[in-house]
Amino acid sequence: MEFSIDPASRLPICRQLSRQMREAVARGKLQPDERLPSVRELSRSLVVNPNTVARVYTELEREGVLNTRPGLGVFVAQPGSELSRKVRKERLQAAVEQFLTEAVHLGFTADEVLSLVSDQVKQFQWRTKDS
């Protein structure tokens, strides 16, 4: 998986990288237990400070997206969160409310939003009820 940084973006480098990693996991481009480049390797290839990459890895580990195996490296975490179902649902609900608020302000109808979401859902890797 190749990551890239847009130096012209107003978004901080750590947010750009974090967003790309989260999306790659959600879309199945990064699979559970897949090893990521070391901090040094990734910082060198992106030409960014190693502390930036380390901060992104730490943040994503805290969120349960990645995990570090001492002596082995950083890996994509298995799906499923250590957060309780109630907390996960509350976080998703807050994100949905923010998304819908933005959609209303942009002038979309409910049907347009549902159609867009339906199209986008197909592009992500979803857990099955068995997993």
Image (cartoon, rainbow, N blue to C red):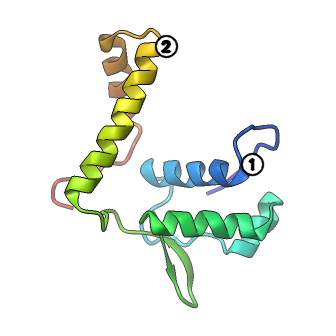
Residue drawn at x 43%, y 50% is: 26
Residue 58 found in image quarter: bottom right
The dot on residue 78 is none
Q: CA distance from mark 2 to mark 1?
A: 28 Å
Mark nearest the camera among 2 and 1 is 2
Residue 60 appears at what percent x and percent y? Answer: 51, 63
| Residue 114 seen | yes
Of 12 and 80, which appears nearest the observer?
12
Q: Secondary structure at mark 1?
A: loop
The dot on residue 106 is 2
What is the residue that sits farthest to the bottom in this orientation? 71
The dot on residue 5 is 1
Of 39 and 15, which appears nearest the observer?
15
Q: Residues within 10 Å of mark 2 (few under 14, many from 20)?
A: few
| Residue 127 seen | no
Residue drawn at x 42%, y 69% is: 77
Is 131 left or right of 63, judged from the image as shown?
left
What is the residue that sits farthest to the left in this orientation? 130
Residue 47 found in image quarter: bottom right
Q: Secondary structure at mark 2?
A: loop
The vertical placement of 11 against 127, above or below, is above
Residue 130 appears at what percent x and percent y? Answer: 16, 59
Q: Residues within 10 Å of mark 1 (few under 14, many from 20)?
A: some
Residue drawn at x 77%, y 43% is: 6
Is 63 left or right of 71, judged from the image as shown?
left
Is 7 left or right of 38, judged from the image as shown?
right
Placement of the C terminus among the 4 image quadrants: bottom left
Number of numbered discs on residues: 2
Is 16 left or right of 82, judged from the image as shown?
right
